[in-house]
Image (tube, rainbow, N blue to C red):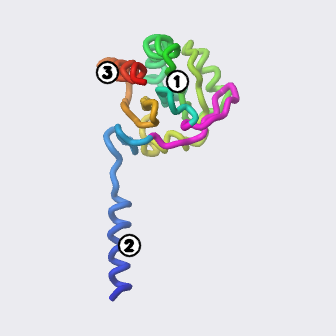
Amino acid sequence: MKLAHSFTFFFLFAFIFANAQPYEHQYLVKVGDMAPDFQIKETSGKLYKLSDLRGSVVMLQFTASWCPVCAREMPHIEKRVWLPGKEKGLKVIGVDLDEPLEKVVAFAKLTNITYPLALDPRGDIFNLFAQKGAGVTRNVIIDRTGRIIFLTRLFKEEEFEAMRLEIFKALEEK
């Protein structure tokens, strides 16, 4: 009887886990969650963990050179978020999905951005935040404690402005 009860519990758990659905826009995280930790390697070669940035407000911008929406959004991030926010301690990291270093460096030059781009060659970082195969254009905003405070999908002006306001509100909080 005990064995049958164990099997029932196992299959119930397996069914629930296998049928777990991602959150809105195929995110695997939600506002209020602690951001998953991972190692970042910027195109400059600088290597660190996301948790090393605790104490700063962080914007992870998931991007790729083949993504036209990403390329359209990046100048807005540069001018409206990065440049006015970096002196206040904002960290913006463009996480490039599954592309080689040379292509990512060329993409940064093409889009005229100055915030750092990092490599995500197999999509391991992306897959911590969104379902594998989900669209790449995303922003994850993380507060000074490491909690996710805002998530976006695609580039919509109204959502972008709400995100921008949330970033600058978080920068004012100490």
* Residue 166, image quadrant: top left
User: Amino acid under label 3?
Assistant: Ala
- Of badges 3 and 1, the one in the foreground is 1
* Direction from residue 33 to residue 113 in the image, left or right: right
* Residue at the image position 37 percent from the left and 30 percent from the top: 152
Q: Which residue is mark 1?
A: 91
Rate crowding at label 3 as few (under 14), some (14 to 19) or many (20 or more) other CA atoms within 10 Å: few
Quarter of the image containing the C terminus? top left
Percent position (x, y) of residue 117?
59, 25
Percent position (x, y) of residue 22?
35, 47
Magenta part of the chain: 35-51
- Of badges 2 and 1, the one in the foreground is 1
Mark 3 element type? helix
**Which of the two discs, 3 and 1, labels the residue nearer the N terminus?**
1
Q: Which residue is mark 3?
A: 162
* Residue at the image position 47 percent from the left and 11 percent from the top: 84
Cβ–Cβ under 8 Å for marks 3 and 1: no
The one of 2 and 75 positioned closer to us in this rendering: 2
**Which of the two discs, 2 and 1, labels the residue nearer the N terminus?**
2
Mark 2 element type? helix
Q: Which residue is mark 2?
A: 10
* Residue 73, image quadrant: top left
| Disc 2/disc 1 C-alpha distance (Å) | 43 Å
User: Amino acid under label 1?
Assistant: Lys
